[in-house]
Amino acid sequence: MSFESALLWSERLLAVALALQSAEMLRIREAFRPGGVWDWELLRADFATWPRAARAFLDATLAPAGFRVLLILQLLAAIGIFVGAPLFALVFVTTALVSLRWRGSFNGGSDAMTLVAILGIGVAHAFRTDPAVGPAALGFVAFQCVLSYFRAGWAKLCVAEWRDGRALRFFLRLPNYDVPPSLARLVDRPRLARGLSLGLLCFELLFPLTLFSPSLALTGIALGLAFHAANFAAFGLNRFFWVWAATYPALYYASHWRGVPS
Amino acid sequence: MAPAKSKGLLFFRALLPNWSFFDRTGEVFLLFGRFRSGPGAEWSEWSDVLPPRPRGFLELFLNPHGSERLAAWSVVEALVDSLEEDPSRIESRVEMRLLRRLVRRRFEDIVSSGSASFQFKLASAQQDFLRSAPFAGQDP
């Protein structure tokens, strides 16, 4: 896969992820209105110790009117990125501000991966004619993608409940994620829970192998998509699906490297 | 309201990924609420403040209410952390006020009276049992 193709696919998938995130946020704008659950008048107290200029900037961008403009701007910028406009700095700032408004994160790791992807893909776009920086920036995205699985797998491996399947049963039975009963019942049998748990650990811990050959990368990507689809089905984590998908072209590109990026 | 000074870095956690998900099992809390239409009226039964939402394939693309619900659970977790850290300051915490808004929104379609009041409680949800509620709060 050439650098240009990888960059193009990365940009388009990132644009889709960003557009969906903006549209989701706009759909719940009622909750931002004065008196709503996520009223800025209430949230701004978190920033009471910040410098006055920073607070004024947050007031301008995160109060209902400014925030709506910010989200529309992010949606338009996502469309712009899809057609090749270099609007990465803008979406980096809007995404960081959205996270800040939600007390650091709206949807956990998906916000972090969105910022990582914007940073890496944005730098790759800016230095697309540079034979070193452009590929290295996509390499950064691929590395973070691999690290995200490996680190998650390692953290689970260190927990005995994950190794024997109890943790998977625990999470699939939590009422706060609305896990469909059919999925929750899957882990009623301890041996199946343990098998699924070990399968998940293997997938996450072996994911770095995807960097070693394109065929392993394609296998990893297929498993990754299935994994995130399952996470959506079980926990409703739709944002993870799209933003991790945006890192896969960089991963596939990096899997072709043999010493020197092409 | 007191800013969460000790939690300053949490506000930048999207910029500082640690890539660990669902790694620790532990105590998880559920949020229940109830209302009454006015002083002297009977309280309703306790019910889920964040009731389950069925999801279909299309929510893979757009899941605004599901995502907001996950954000609301983060507020519940933040409140539990704040309670463990310093219960005496809980009334001044932003997460406490956010939860009050969540509870009010949950019931405002049912009881629109200006004199209505609300309560909520957190209860531990461990596998198949509910423990006694460690906390209850009334919307002022």
Image (cartoon, rainbow, N blue to C red):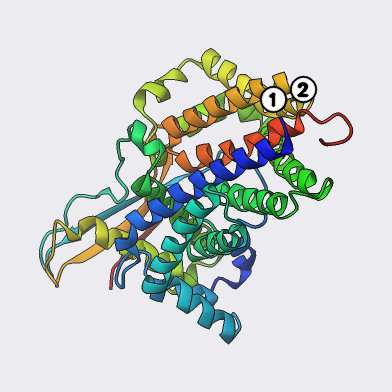
Q: CA distance from mark 2 to mark 1?
A: 6 Å
Locate residue B42, reporting x and y percent: 12, 59
The chain carrying label 1 is A
User: Label 1 is placed on what type of residue?
Assistant: Ala
Name the image quarter holding residue B8.
bottom right
Write the residue at 53% across / 56% down: A105
In the picture shown, does residue B63 fall above or below B101? above
User: Which numbered dot is residue A189?
Assistant: none
User: Label 2 is placed on what type of residue?
Assistant: Ser
The chain carrying label 2 is A
Q: Is residue A10 left or right of residue B1?
A: right
Q: Residues within 10 Å of mark 2 (few under 14, many from 20)?
A: some
Name the image quarter holding residue B6.
bottom right
Locate residue A153, reporting x and y percent: 67, 32
Q: Quadrant of the N terminus of chain A?
A: top right
Q: Is residue A50 left or right of residue A236?
A: right
Between residues B101 and A12, which one lies in front from this camera angle? A12
The residue to which callout 1 is attached is A217
The residue to which callout 2 is attached is A213
Name the image quarter holding residue B117.
bottom left
In the picture shown, does residue A234 fall above or below B66? above
Disc 2 + disc 1, Cβ < 8 Å: yes
Q: Check the image and name the residue furthest to the bottom.
A: A52
